[in-house]
Image (spheres, rainbow, N blue to C red):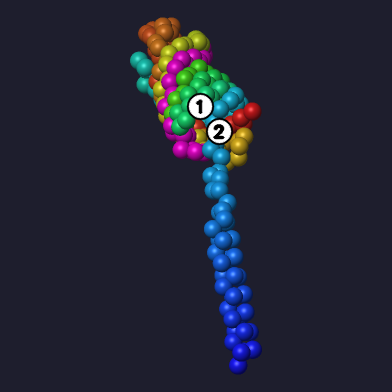
């Protein structure tokens, strides 16, 4: 009987010691710290290409040049928290033209130099943009042609999505307004007002 009680006491002591050791180990256990994924960075220079559709009208004339436009862009972004701001320049070739009665007008190329600013939600950037615009406008009448470089402004907005640390894709709308200049083929002053919806990709360095 005494031996049985002795072995029982020894077993209880061992079990109690094991439980206390387990409690001590649990007390010193530290869960691994949670490391959130790194925020997407929009900072730095970039280059890219775009393709879209242009439609508009010649002021003081019934022609409405419409066509495909595409080109290249380059810029630089600064980032402060969620706020992203910078500058971008682009140059575009365009097939936009239209013929109405005796006149034909076209806009073979144009470019912009713009500021950009927006809010980033990690890898999604919503922005507005605006600045200087310039381009070639050509008028034709009965075999006579006349072309002028015209200047104006542009305003727009867009969304850009980063899908790798260096590559992003964007969709953008721009309003272009080129001031009137005198044309002998129409006997009056004409300008160009146009909309541009385009898609593009950028590579950031």
Residue displayed at 48% across by 19% down:
114
Instruction: Say if the magenta span includes residue 130.
Output: yes
Tell me the quarter of the image containing the C terminus: top right
What secondary structure predominates along the stretch shown in magenta?
strand
One can see residue 92 in this view: no
Question: Which circle's residue, 2 or 1, is located before the other in the chain?
Answer: 2
Image location (x, y in percent) of residue 77: 53, 24
Disc 2 crowd rating (10 Å Cα; few below 14, some 14-19, many 20+) is some
Tell me the quarter of the image containing the N terminus: bottom right
Q: Is residue 105 above or below residue 41?
A: above
Image location (x, y in percent) of residue 74: 58, 23
Image location (x, y in percent) of residue 156: 42, 26
Q: Name the residue under label 1.
A: 79
Find residue 204 and name its label.
none
Find residue 41 and name its label.
2
Q: Which of 6 and 162 is in front in this view?
A: 6
Residue displayed at 57% across by 36% down:
168
How far is disc 2 from disc 1 in space, using C-alphas? Answer: 8 Å
Q: Which of 1 and 21 is in front in this view?
A: 1
Image location (x, y in percent) of residue 45: 60, 24
One can see residue 5 in this view: yes
Assess whether mark 1 and mark 2 are in contact (beta carbons under 8 angstroms): yes
On the image, which quarter does residue 46 sit in?
top right
Q: In this view, does 139 lie to the left or right of 59?
A: right
Region rendered in magenta: 119-145
Q: For the view shown, which residue lies furthest in the bottom direction?
A: 1
């Amino acid at each position: 009987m005494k031996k049985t009680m002795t072995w029982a006491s020894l077993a209880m002591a061992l079990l109690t010691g094991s439980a206390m050791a387990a409690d001590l180990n649990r007390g010193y256990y530290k869960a691994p710290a949670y490391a959130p994924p790194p925020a997407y960075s929009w900072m730095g220079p970039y280059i890219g290409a775009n393709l879209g559709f242009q439609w508009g009208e010649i002021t003081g004339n019934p022609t409405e040049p419409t066509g495909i436009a595409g080109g290249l862009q380059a810029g630089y972004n600064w980032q402060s928290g969620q706020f992203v701001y910078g500058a971008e320049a682009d140059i575009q070739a365009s097939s936009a033209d239209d013929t109405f009665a005796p006149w034909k007008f076209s806009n073979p190329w144009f470019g912009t130099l713009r500021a950009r600013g927006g809010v980033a939600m990690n890898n999604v950037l919503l922005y507005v943009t605006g600045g200087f615009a310039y381009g070639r406008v050509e008028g034709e009448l009965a075999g006579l042609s006349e072309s002028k470089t015209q200047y104006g402004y542009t305003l727009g907005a867009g969304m850009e999505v980063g899908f790798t640390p260096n590559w992003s894709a964007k969709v953008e709308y721009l309003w272009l307004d080129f001031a009137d200049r005198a044309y002998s083929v129409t006997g009056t002053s004409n300008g160009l007002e146009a909309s541009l919806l385009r898609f593009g990709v950028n590579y950031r360095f």
